[in-house]
Image (spheres, helix red, strand yellow):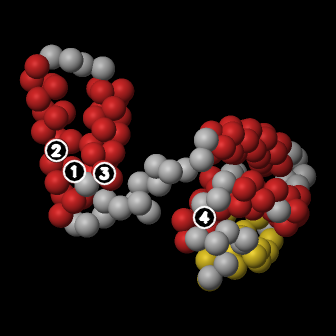
Amino acid sequence: MQNTLYLTAILVAFWLLLSGHNTPLILFCGALSVLLTVFIAYRMQVVDDEAQPLQLPARMVLYLLWLAKEIVLANISVCRRIWSPTLDISPTFICIKATQKTQFGIMAYANSITVTPGTVCVDVQDNNLTVHALNWKAAHDLLEGEMDRRISELGI
């Protein structure tokens, strides 16, 4: 029940943030859509701790800021390589062992790799991730394990 209330509060806040309107009809339609969404999620039995990891530590904000910085740096690197007259790329596949203990942690690691330009996680088998990298430097950065360490420190 607590997770259902959290889901409702999050959806209401998100809807109000995106809507920008507060006329009675729009508020009624928003409330109706939130209630319908929560009802469907409840009936599907997808409202649980894993689907809503609200207990994530405050360090998550620091990780997201670090990830945003890495995404910007990777964007710059990819743009430089693509715009270079010599097309300095060396596509490669690497296998990485994830140190996360939960499926959620492994999923967060794989998604963090994928949202970083120049790298894509193409397969996950247990704790082994297969990653395609645009160049060897991107692959080497992943093999150093900074991203893996930061996600492991989150305790997810």
Image coordinates for residue 89, horizontal then vertical, percent: 84, 59
Q: Mark 1 points at which residue?
A: 38
- The percent position of residue 134, horizontal first and vertical second, equals 77, 61
Please rate how many residues cluster around mark 1, counting C-alpha atoms within 10 Å: few if below 14, some from 14 to 19, many from 20. Answer: some
**Extreme front residue here?**
2
Give the SS element for disc 4: helix
Residue that appears at 66% across and 54% down: 154
Image quadrant in which the N terminus is located: bottom left
Task: Choose the circle earlier in sequence order: 2 or 4.
Answer: 2
Above or below 21: residue 87: below
User: With respect to residue 64, does 145 lie above or below?
Assistant: below
* Residue 109 image-quadrant placement: bottom right
- Disc 1, disc 2: CB below 8 Å? yes
Say what amino acid the circle numbered 3 marks: Gln
Select label 3 or label 2 by which is in front: 3
Q: Identify the residue position indicated by label 4 in the image.
A: 105
Of labels 3 and 1, the one closer to you: 3
Disc 2 marks a residue whose amino acid type is Leu
Q: Distance between the residues labelled 4 and 1?
A: 25 Å
Give me the residue at 16% from left, 54% from top. 39
**Residue that mark 3 sits on:** 2
Task: Give the residue displayed 82% in from the left and 56% down from the top.
Answer: 146
Q: How far apart are marks 2 and 4 (CA)?
A: 30 Å
Q: Return the residue at label 2.
A: 35
Q: Which residue is drawn at 55% across and 71% down?
A: 103
Label 1: which secondary element: helix
